[in-house]
Image (tube, rainbow, N blue to C red):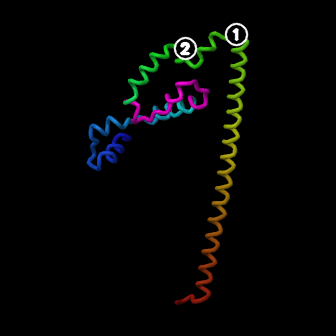
């Protein structure tokens, strides 16, 4: 269904996209797009090394054009840079435990922030519902008063 919507809008209303449009526009299922967004946000939150900044910045439309460049770059880097956690294997056990503890603390803090955001969202939703009910009540009372005023002024006109 998502492909049809794109083809109808991207194909000039004829229902089909030209071959050149299909090669420059990458169509992704929602779940794959969400996974890519999560991966990009994870990459953005991690400290990056020199030469890796441009990896997460390619747009989906440019992905096919840059694939060969990425393959060459990854062959040049060969192994050590490919896994961001590879350096942990050479660390002392106590240091790894410390890193794991720090990451756990960061994760716990993030979970607490998320819970606070959820609670704040619920509170804001309740406030909104309360205001909505008040406005509806005021509107209905004003309509009643307006109807009474119309009836008392002219009544039979």
> Is 80 contained in the magenta span?
no
Q: In terms of depth relative to the viewer, which is nearer, 112 or 138?
A: 112
Residue topped by disc 2: 80
Residue 48 appears at what percent x and percent y? 58, 26
Q: Which mark is residue 92?
A: 1
Residue appearing at x 38%, y 35% in the figure: 26
Left or right of 87 in this view: 32: left
Question: Is residue 39 shown above or below 10?
Answer: above
Q: Quadrant of the N terminus?
A: top left
Residue 57 appears at what percent x and percent y? 49, 33
Residue appearing at x 38%, y 24% in the figure: 68
Secondary element at tag 1: loop
Residue 71 appears at what percent x and percent y? 42, 20
Mark 2 nearby-residue class (10 Å; few <14, some 14–19, many ≥20): few
Q: In terms of depth relative to the viewer, which is nearer, 52 or 120?
A: 52
* First along the sequence among labels 1 and 2: 2
């Amino acid at each position: 269904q998502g492909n049809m919507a794109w083809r109808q809008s991207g194909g000039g209303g004829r229902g089909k996209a030209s071959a050149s449009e299909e090669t420059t526009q990458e169509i992704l299922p929602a779940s794959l797009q969400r996974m890519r967004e999560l991966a990009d946000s994870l990459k953005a939150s991690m400290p990056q090394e020199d030469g890796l900044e441009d990896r997460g910045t390619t747009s989906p439309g440019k992905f096919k054009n840059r694939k060969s460049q990425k393959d060459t770059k990854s062959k040049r880097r060969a192994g050590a840079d490919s896994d961001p956690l590879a350096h942990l294997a050479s660390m002392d056990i106590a240091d790894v435990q410390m890193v794991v503890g720090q990451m756990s603390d960061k994760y716990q803090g993030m979970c607490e922030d998320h819970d606070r955001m959820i609670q704040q969202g619920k509170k804001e939703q309740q406030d909104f519902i309360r205001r909505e009910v008040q406005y509806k009540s005021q509107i209905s009372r004003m309509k009643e008063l307006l109807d009474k005023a119309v009836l008392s002024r002219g009544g039979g006109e």
